[in-house]
Structures are given as structure tokens and as C-alpha cells.
Amino acid sequence: MSHVFPRVWDRRLPVAVRAQGAWVEDAEGRRYLDASGGAIVVNVGHADPSLVQAACDHLRRLSYVHATMFTTEALERYAEALAPVLPMAGARIYPVSGGSEAVETAIKMARAYHLARGHPSRRTVIARRSSYHGNTIGALDASGKEVLRAPYTPWLGRFLHAPRAYEYRCENPEHPSGCGAWHAAELERMIGSYGPETIAAFIAEPVSGATLAAAVPSDDYWPAVVEVCRRHDVLVIADEVMTGFGRTGRWFGVDHWGVRPDILVAGKGATSGYVPFGFAACSEEVFETIRPSGFVHGFTWSHNGLGAAVGEAVLRRLGDDGLLDRGARLGARLLGELREALAEVPVVGEVRGLGPMIGIELVRDRTSKEPFARRDRVAERVLAAAREAGLLLYGSVGHVDGRDGDLVMLGPPFVMDEDEAGLVVERTAGAIEAVGAVGS
């Protein structure tokens, strides 16, 4: 009997024993091609020698010191190397242990900024429906996925949710015309309804992640909503936990639209999953505003040197070693070939994405976009069929109405070679076709 409290209840998990490049192997010798990078985490690949060496070198010298007592060379070097690629001027980095902590930190930063400016009424955060920003209570309150919020609704309700940026099921009556302007008008209406003096920040993923499977907004979306935020002195928080560090083909997702957020949060690919790590970064203007009053916040494992050491190695692999560009090319190839392979599969509503972040929406009817009923468990069956074929995919459900809706995501390591990419396309298409033939 295991004494582990598991995350999966409906099946017995294989025991992973080793991984290399784009492959994971279990205790029984089965090999799985990791097309999802775990939960869209592993960008530079498994068992990268330079990341392992960076961790070992740091641990040989230093294990743990508290951030109120010491800084470390690893942390200072990482911040110095990271700041130039962040889409903000004079960036200041607050390292934490992962994405949820990073979002909590960012929300508190926004509050501290407005308090320092003498605006204590600015306490509300606007996020989007069908969003995900983490599983701590504050991050979950910002999140807009009802199936995750439902058990904890008595503890939630402080934050607001604007329409989702979801072109496949866009709420704009004039879609596809003027979607950015429509979203901006909805955000403007919400800010006006509650009063600009009460709104602290707007938080969103540049490209929607797990909850909408790589839903890319219209090109006019981000410029329009940022303009509204600037006009009302609402801070812009870019949630780059999934989209950062090359996952959309650029350093950060907002780079595609030239957005300069006030605060940016990251995790996942920051260390390629080798060490639990994330950060909230703010602009110099935000930092200098907060500095005189201080920032009441902190974690035992914040400002950790081990995560910073591995993070610096990731920066080198992505930049100096060219993996950022390689990932962009890999993503373009996979997106094109998956669209071609799935073009005639009746249960595939859309294949979408940006860079090596790809989503597939599964529907009962292509014309009406009617989703499968939850009881059909289509996404789960596709993932199971893929696993049986030796392929790891990532799934999400309930995005249409809080209950129905099936999504499959791919987010492979950027080191995947051409033969492996071909296998991803072949096995993904095979799993969807096999399940679709039964499910439809």
C-alpha cells in the first residue's frame, strides 16, 4: 500500500525511473515520447548535462540561506542575465518556488504599489473567465475555471472576470471583426461599473494555457486592453508561467504584441522543471514606488540560489545554444503537420497554437461546435490511447460551460529531433482517430 496522497485517483500510475532528451522511461522499461513536456514544463529537454551540472555545482558550495540574511552569487548572476530579456525597463525579480506563488506575489505587488501611492481603495484584480493562474486561494480567485473553483467558492469572490480571449468561441457579436475593440470595451465597462478607484490590476496569460489549450487572441487584443488599463492606472500583470521561456517561440508571449507589462510572472520553463522555481518581476517604476514603504511578503524558499543557478543555465541553453529558435521551428512544423493530419478528422474542431505550444479542440459536431458530453470522457480516452502508443499528451476538460468540452495540448521539449516530431504527429493523429471513431 502506498502512503502517497495522489493527484490521480482513477488509474495506477507507472513509476518513472529515467528520462533523456524527449523521452521518459518507466520501471517496466516502457518508453514514452514526451510531447507535452509534462504539464507544458520541460523546454530544454530531460537530463540536460549543463542544468544538472549547474545544480550540482551550486549545492556543493551552498545549500540554503534565508533571504533576509543573505543574497547569493547565483541569484545576483541570474537576475543580471534575466533582466535584459524581460519585456520591461529596469526589471526587479522576486524569485519563489513556482507559478502559484509567483501569482500571489504579483497580486501583492500590485496592492503594495497602490498603497504606496496613497490609493488604498484599489484592491480588486480583474482576470478572465476560463483562465488559470494557480491553486493557492489568491491565485485561484483570479483563475476563472469553474471546475477548479467550485469546491472552494465560500473562500473566493474578491476578484472579477472579464470575457475570455477565445477566438474559436468568440463572444463578440461581430466576430471576427473588431474583437480587440470589443474586449477593450467590455473591460472599460467593467472598470467603469466598479469604479476605476477600486481596480488594482488586470492579469491574463498572453496565450491561454491549459484551460483553453493554446487559444491565441486576435492581434488587436493586447494593444487594446493595455490601452484601457493605462488610461485607468490599472497595472498589467502578464502571466507567463506557461508561455514564458520560449514556449510561444519567443522569450515571452507578450513579445509577439510588443506589450510591456508592469509585472510579469513565470515558472515552469524557467528551470525546465529541474527545480521548483518561479518569479514575479516588476518594472523599475513599480519597484521604486514600493521601495520606500517596503513589501510585506515572503516565503521560506523565496530567493533560492539553487533555482537561480539552474535558471541561469536555462537562459544559456535557450539563448547562446539556440534552443529558443529551435523551439520556434519545431512548433511551426508540428502545428502545420498536425493541421494537415487532422484536417479530415470529424471530431477535431480546431488545431491552434503559437510556437511549440499547441492545442487541439475536440467536438461532437464540427459545424455547430457542439462539445462532447462530459460522460464521454473523450479527452481522457485520447490521452490513454496516446499513452498506450508511447506518447504523452496533456488534457483539459470543462471549458465550454464548466462541464463539457475536451482539449488536448502539446508542449514538447525543444530538443526534439525531426524523427521524433514525425512520431508525435503520427501517434497524436492515431490516438484521436481511434477515439473519435468510437466517440462520435
Image (cartoon, helix red, strand yellow):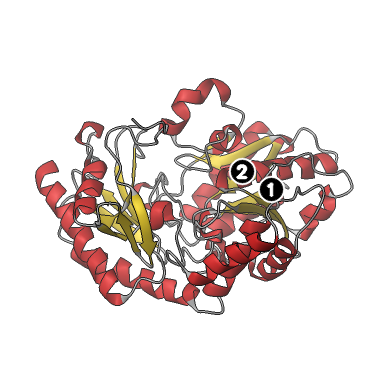
Disc 1 crowd, CA 10 A, few/some/many (<14, 14-19, 20+): many
Q: Earlier in the sequence, mark 1 or mark 2?
A: 2
Q: Does the CB distance between marks 1 and 2 fall below 8 Å?
A: yes
Q: Residue at x 25, y 57 (%)?
A: 29
Report, in whole angstroms, how far the alpha carbon at label 1 lies from the one at label 2: 9 Å
- The quadrant in which the C terminus is found is top left
Left or right, 146 with reference to 367: right
Residue 338, quarter of picture: bottom left
Q: Amino acid at mark 2?
A: Glu
Q: Residues within 10 Å of mark 2 (few under 14, many from 20)?
A: many
Residue at image point 36% right, 40% down? 399
Q: Is residue 188 left or right of residue 410?
A: right
**Secondary structure beneath label 1:** loop
Amino acid under disc 1:
Ser
Residue drawn at point x = 50 percent, y = 49 percent: 182
Query: Residue 219: which numbered mark, if any?
Result: none
**Is 188 or 419 nearer to us in this picture?**
419
> Helix or strand or loop: what does disc 2 sit on?
helix
Nearer to us in this view, 164 or 324? 324
Q: Position of residue 393 (x, y in %)?
A: 31, 53
Compared with residue 33, is residue 317 higher up or lower down, i.e. above or below? below
Q: Which residue is mark 1?
A: 302
- Indicate which label's residue lies in the foreground, 1 or 2: 1
- Picture residue at 60% right of the left edge, 34% below the top: 138
Measured as percent of width and height from the top left, residue 65 is found at: 74, 50
* Image vertical order of residue 62 relative to residue 127, above or below: below
* Image location of residue 27, percent across then percent down: 29, 52
Q: Is residue 126 left or right of residue 440?
A: right
Residue 401: x percent and y percent?
35, 34
- Check the image and report above or below for 234 versus 345: above
Disc sitting over residue 101 in the figure:
2
Which of the 4 image quarters holds residue 42? bottom left
